[in-house]
Amino acid sequence: MTRLFALLGLVLITACTNANDLDEAPAYLGNFHLGHNVVVAPNLTKGPASREASKEEWIEAMTTAMSDRFGRYDGGKLYHIGVSVEGYVLAIPGVPIVASPKSALILNVTAWDDAAGKKLNTKPHTVTVVESISGNTFLGSGLTQSKERQMLNLSRNAAKQIQNWLQNQNNDKGWFEDDGKPAKGKSRPAPVAPAEADAAAAQEVPGAETSDGKSLAAAE
């Protein structure tokens, strides 16, 4: 894969988004709720000077990373995400400073609107991931990490980049908004304290209606 091989020349100057935010509130994605989480790897290509990883291993790693990140959303509309893992490099041990091996991952992403029964992006969106720079990977993860740890980090970074892309699309095009309008500037509503929720419910009861159109007060 030409793109994958060209990527190897950029990894030393490319930064990656920090994906260690799963314990924080998820970024705003409107009414998003994850439906099908589909990961495939029909065209998987291993880059040069890479450890070996099977299609099944990549599918499991990406499926878990996507579920961990997007399973936190509890919106009222279903959206499906399809991921195709295209190519990877899992750095092998090398000579520090001189050969400094790095890991990378390339995948294609498609989002689907379940209610509309159509793709949100007709052309797959390509995501390019490079390992995060840290104390353990400054000289290259091939020197300090196992294959499994490299795959975990790359998969988590990929899921975070997919979230960033979906958030940008929602901000610009309103993909996950009920009114279909750009969501730029919107944020997740603040949680309502139990006492406030009870008070609000009590105020709404007199004006509420049953399924036959009668008010709850009349029904009582």
Image: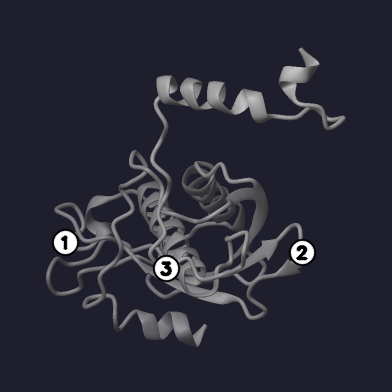
- Residue 118 appears left or right of 13: right
Q: Earlier in the sequence, mark 1 or mark 3?
A: 1
Q: Residues within 10 Å of mark 1 (few under 14, many from 20)?
A: some
The kind of residue tagged 3 is: Lys
Q: Secondary structure at mark 1?
A: loop
Where is mark 3, residue-wise? 184
Decide if residue 36 is in sight here.
no
Q: Earlier in the sequence, mark 3 or mark 2?
A: 2
- Residue 158 appears left or right of 63: left
Where is mark 2, residue-wise? 116
Q: Residue 49 placed where, x, y %?
A: 37, 71
For discs 1 and 3, the disc positioned in front in the rendered view: 3
Q: Residues within 10 Å of mark 3 (few under 14, many from 20)?
A: some
Q: Secondary structure at mark 2?
A: loop
The quadrant in which residue 112 appears is bottom right
Q: Residue 72 placed where, x, y %?
A: 50, 41
Q: Is residue 209 above or below residue 218?
A: below
Q: Residue 71 placed where, x, y %?
A: 54, 43
Q: Is residue 149 above or below residue 169?
A: above
Q: Secondary structure at mark 3?
A: loop
Q: Earlier in the sequence, mark 1 or mark 2?
A: 2
For discs 1 and 2, the disc positioned in front in the rendered view: 2
In the rendered structure, find residue 138 and report the number of the disc placed on it: 1
Cα distance between the residues tagged 1 and 3: 35 Å
What residue is at 41 percent from the left and 75 percent from the top?
Answer: 48
What residue is at 58 percent from the left and 66 percent from the top?
Answer: 175
